[in-house]
Image: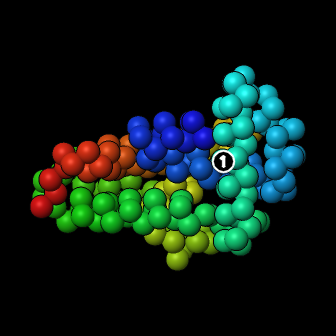
Amino acid sequence: MYIAQKLKKENIAEYLLYMWQTEDLIRACHLNADELKKNYTDRFQVSDEQKRAIEQWYEQLIRMMREEGVQEKGHLQINKNVILTLTDLHLRLLRSEKFPDYTAAYYKALPRIVDIRNRGDHKDLSELENCFDALYGVMMLRLQKKPLSEGTQQAANDIAGLLRLLSAYYHQEQKGTLNID
C-alpha cells in the first residue's frame, strides 16, 4: 500500500507494474486474505497500525478482484483506468510538435512494439498495454533468474525509455506544468 502510494506519486509506469504484480500476488494466495497475511504481510516490519492498514488495502483489492471478475486473469478497473489515462496522454504527446523527444522515443520503440503485438495473442490491446505486458514479462523472467536474449533486453530498454518519458510527462500534467497545446 505504502509502496503503491509512493510509486503513484513518483512514477506512474512503475506503479502500474507494481499493481499488476500485486494482482498476481493476490491470485497466488487464492484471493484469501488469511493466506496472504500468513505468506506475505506478516513479514512486514511495521507498526500494528500500519500492518492493519496494509491488510485492509489487500482485503479491498481482493473484494474488487472478485466483484470485477478478475480472479484468474485480467486487471482491476483502477489499473485499466491508468492505462486509459496514459494512452490518452501518449496520443496527445504524439500529435503535438512540442515533444520531439517523446516522438523519437516512440519511433525507437515502435519496431519492438510491432514485434510484440505480432507475436502475442493480445492484438486487441493498446500499444501501451502491450508495452506494459512486455516489461512485466521481462520483470517476471528476471525474478525467476531466467536469461534474457539480447533482443529481448534491447526491446525492454527501448520500451522502458518510452514509458519513463511518458511517466515524467504524466507527472508534469498532474502538477499542471505540462502544456501540450
Q: Amino acid at mark 1?
A: Trp
Residue 45 spot, x, y in % from top left = 72, 22
Q: Is residue 152 visible?
A: no
Kindly identify the residue that appears in the image at 38 percent across and 59 percent down. 86
Identify the residue under disc 1: 57
Q: Is residue 10 above or below residue 104?
A: above
Does residue 44 appear in this view?
Answer: yes
Percent coordinates x, y for residue 159 in the rendering = 43, 49
In the visual, does 46 lie left or right of 87?
A: right
Q: Nearer the viewer, residue 76 or 37?
A: 37
Quadrant placement of the C terminus? bottom left
Please state which of residues 67 and 121 is positioned toward the viewer in this rendering: 67
At which x and y percent is residue 152?
Answer: 55, 47
The x, y position of residue 123, in whole percent, is: 53, 74
Between 8 and 111, the residue placed more toward the observer is 8
Q: Is residue 15 left or right of residue 66?
A: left
Front in this rendered view, residue 160 or 111: 160
